[in-house]
Amino acid sequence: MSTAVAAAGWVGTVLGAGVRVFDLGRPLFRGMPQSPNHPPYWHTLPRRHGDGVRADGGSAAADHISLGTHVGTHIDAFSHVSHDGVLFGDIDAQEAQRGGRMTALGAETIEPMFLRGVLLDVPAALGLPGCAPGYEITPADLDATLERQGSSLGAGDVALVRSGWGPRFSSPDPAEYLGHDSGVPGVSEAGARWLADRGVHAAGADTIAFECLPPGQGHALLPAHRVLLVERGIHIIEAMELEELAAEGVHEFLFVLSSLKLVGATGSPVRPLAVVPGAVAA
């Protein structure tokens, strides 16, 4: 049986029953934690109820928002990262960005995802509530996680790596989630190759940058981004909410994601979902 047929059968099993949906996206709000490399989220209400009232008494309010495409829960397009001047597929990065937008590998090229998802709950496998600041998640950790969970990970799957860092997103101090001084746990370069060698379609995490950020170094080096985005053509999803999935012991699910068709953009905000069989509470 082909991987595609097997995946289709698994999805059919999920959708054939009552389902439960887990929201894996973060709320967007002014002052939220975000990488300092990107424009912040901003929201205003330029049209308010009462500014204009129709003859029948009706009124409407309307918003204006602005944000970088890598703020909040978001997906990286392949145009986001280059190495030695080239993007995925040996596309010249300088040529691709002429004209003020990416003419190749923009966010509009990201296909909607309706795939088998696997949560890799690394801290649970290590017997910890969460990985330590700056902890590098290795292939051995990922192997141990699959073994403990009794899960498999194969071609076309979406791998979501939980480090346990996610609750810091709700800290009163956004700097705690960014972890510049403390470091942030994440997937190592070798861990990224481990994921790529299994043929995953995309990889996500509960941190600001997916990969390990050593203390005091911030985004100085991002080798896992190079491996996944530039070398292997695997999308990265960052700042995900994975705590509820982990608390419920849900390791395999139907993963649903669709990005905005932002032509020429290097990424897009997303609201990913995990869908599992189960009765919906009345």
Image (cartoon, helix red, strand yellow):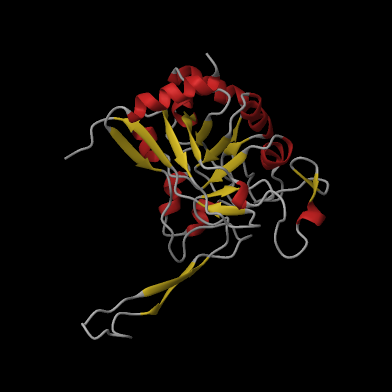
Query: Which residue corresponds to the image point at 49% horizontal and 50% vertical from the top-left?
Result: 270
Query: Which residue corresponds to the image point at 50% horizontal and 23% vertical from the top-left?
Result: 145
User: Depth check: 86 or 250 in front?
Assistant: 86
Picture quadrant where residue 189 is located: top right
User: Depth check: 168 or 157 in front?
Assistant: 157
Q: Which residue is at the far front? A: 55
- For this view, does 155 lie left or right of residue 89? left
Q: Position of residue 229 (x, y in %)?
A: 68, 41
Q: Position of residue 230 (x, y in %)?
A: 72, 41
The correct choice, above or below, for 174 with respect to 89 in the image is below
- Kindly tell me whether residue 211 is visible in this rendering: no
The correct choice, above or below, for 224 with respect to 178 in the image is above
Q: Which residue is at the far left? A: 282
Q: How many marks?
A: 0
- For this view, does 124 lie left or right of residue 34? left
Q: Position of residue 95 (x, y in %)?
A: 81, 56
User: Depth check: 70 or 64 in front?
Assistant: 64
- Kindly tell me whether residue 86 is visible in this rendering: yes
Query: Which residue corresponds to the image point at 61% horizontal and 61% vertical from the top-left?
Result: 38
Q: Position of residue 42 (x, y in %)?
A: 49, 69
Quadrant position of the C terminus in the picture: top left
